[in-house]
Image (cartoon, helix red, strand yellow):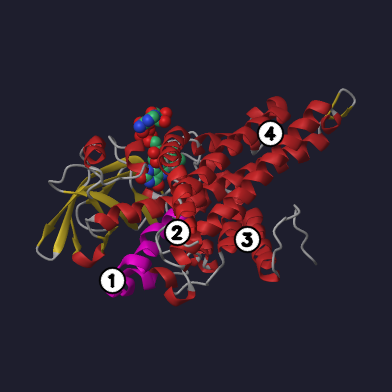
Amino acid sequence: MVWMPKYLDLDELSEEDRMLKEEVHRFAEEVIRPASIELDRMPPEERVKPGSPYFKVWKQIKKLGYHRMYLPENKGGPGLTPLQRYILFEEIAWGSLGFATALGVDMIPFVSAAFFGTPEIYEDLVVPWIEDSEGKFHGCWGVTEPEHGSDYLITLREEPELVAKFGKGNVVAEKDGDEWVISGQKSAWVSSAPVATHCGLHAQLKGSRSIAEGLFCIVPLDADGVKKGRPADMLGMRDDPQGELFFDGVRIPEHYVVVAPGFFYGVFFDQLLCLTSCGMGAFAVGLARACFEEALHYARQRVQGGVPIVKHKNVKLKLYEMFEKVETARYYVRKATEYTHKKIIEQQTADASPRHARAAQIYAKKIAYEVAHDALQIFGAYGLIKEFVIEKFFRDARCMLIEDGTVEVLSLEAAEDVIDNYEKEFYDVNHVMRVLG
Ligand SMILES: Cc1cc2nc3c(=O)[nH]c(=O)nc-3n(C[C@H](O)[C@H](O)[C@H](O)COP(=O)(O)OP(=O)(O)OC[C@H]3O[C@@H](n4cnc5c(N)ncnc54)[C@H](O)[C@@H]3O)c2cc1C
């Protein structure tokens, strides 16, 4: 049977792109979506127990090799194009925002180590992770702390007055011979922490002025001194468990520090946030599209005033506006992803544009919430009960406005970047053109 995409793709997809989209969509529809609905309704402790649907899906994700998607061929990956990575993320998120997030955070420690770590960490940790087809490995990303939520998700600039502004971190790292010793606590919201085996961890250098002076390392979560908190009972994103991580004098070998303290740490963090922003943008489009499709389907079935509600003008307009938002977000996020991936993954020049990556995340998150809100309205009271998946999507979309940085803080950060640099860069380009004649 020839697979027909549900929507017209304005990008000219190659045969390979189309096949990938079809494969991932089927998996999202048949495996991920049903498991995510089941997980959403389970108590937090049950979701993380061995045998829960979470692990069954995780094993299949690994078997399909989706965790390798960011790695180029010379680093053991499938060598996907930026567009293919985008497609994969949108389709998975269409099935479940939770599993898309789990896949995203799983990659952060290992892909960072593949790009910036030593050959030893590549052999010790990255190769076994690449080869995992059983779901034995699960990464997470330990950034935020009880006292540092938004503070940690904005650019950690080097200017002295800003360094002081961020304040001291909770998690600190200290060198002891050829090992590093880690102590402190990450926030209760670390995605996948309750089920993770390794954490890509940001820690402040002990004795330094603030979290801006830090390092990025990988901590195996079965190391002595690591403790996990209880899985959080969240409003949404319940298909990916969140929880605290505690470190009490945890020792890691020197080569598990992927990015050492120093100037490059700030650059690394900034570029990593560009990648995560594009990923979050793709997740938001996937979720928004899922909401739009549910609403369109429902509006054809539900009869009120003697006709299917899709015939009422207000419903028609709402559906059109939802379509418009999903489409515009998709192509902006794709463009930002293409640019960001070219700079960071292909050319490895570490000069992606934070403001464009942030704009992709912020815009897509906002439209996901608006589309989820309007979709629920089309369902009327049925949108408020658990029998219809739109109720879950709405809760997930609400979480997105906070996950990976609140939209307000990300917007303020991007605004400062635009105000400080937009005209300067324009002037510089014109100046160079003039000098070159
Ligand atoms: C579903 C989910 C998954 C998550 N996954 C992870 C994860 O994998 N790893 C991880 O480390 N963390 C994770 N987080 C944490 C997330 O990054 C933080 O919740 C987020 O950065 C906001 O921090 P906070 O909750 O402490 O809020 P706060 O920073 O306390 O913000 C509270 C309010 O104050 C506003 N505010 C704060 N600072 C400023 C400022 N400087 N200027 C203007 N307004 C400000 C905010 O906009 C917000 O409205 C996750 C969170 C959620 C909800």
Pointer 3 residue = 24
Q: Is mark 4 in CB contact (under 8 Å) with mark 2?
A: no
Within 10 Å of disc 2 (Cα), the crowding (few <14, some 14-19, many 20+) is few
Residue at disc 1, CB closer than 8 Å to ligand 1: no
Asked whether the viewer can see residue 242, the reply is no
Tell me which numbered mark, 4 or 2, is placed earlier along the sequence.
Answer: 4
**Image point 31% across, 45% down: which residue?**
156
- Residue 249: image tag: none
Element under label 1? loop
Q: Position of residue 91 (x, y in %)?
A: 62, 54
Kindly report which numbered mark, 1 or 2, lies closer to the viewer in this rendering. 2
Question: Magenta segment, which residues?
Answer: 104-128
Q: Is residue 203 left or right of residue 347?
A: left
Q: Is residue 394 above or below residue 130?
A: above
Q: Is residue 305 above or below residue 274?
A: above
Give the mark nearer the N terminus: 3 vs 1.
Answer: 3
Q: Which residue is mark 4?
A: 375
Q: Is residue 110 rendered magenta in the image? A: yes
**Numbered disc in front, either 4 or 1:** 1
Q: Earlier in the sequence, mark 1 or mark 2?
A: 1
Going 28% across and 51% down the picture, which residue do you hit? Answer: 202
At 76% across and 54% down in the image, what residue appears? Answer: 8
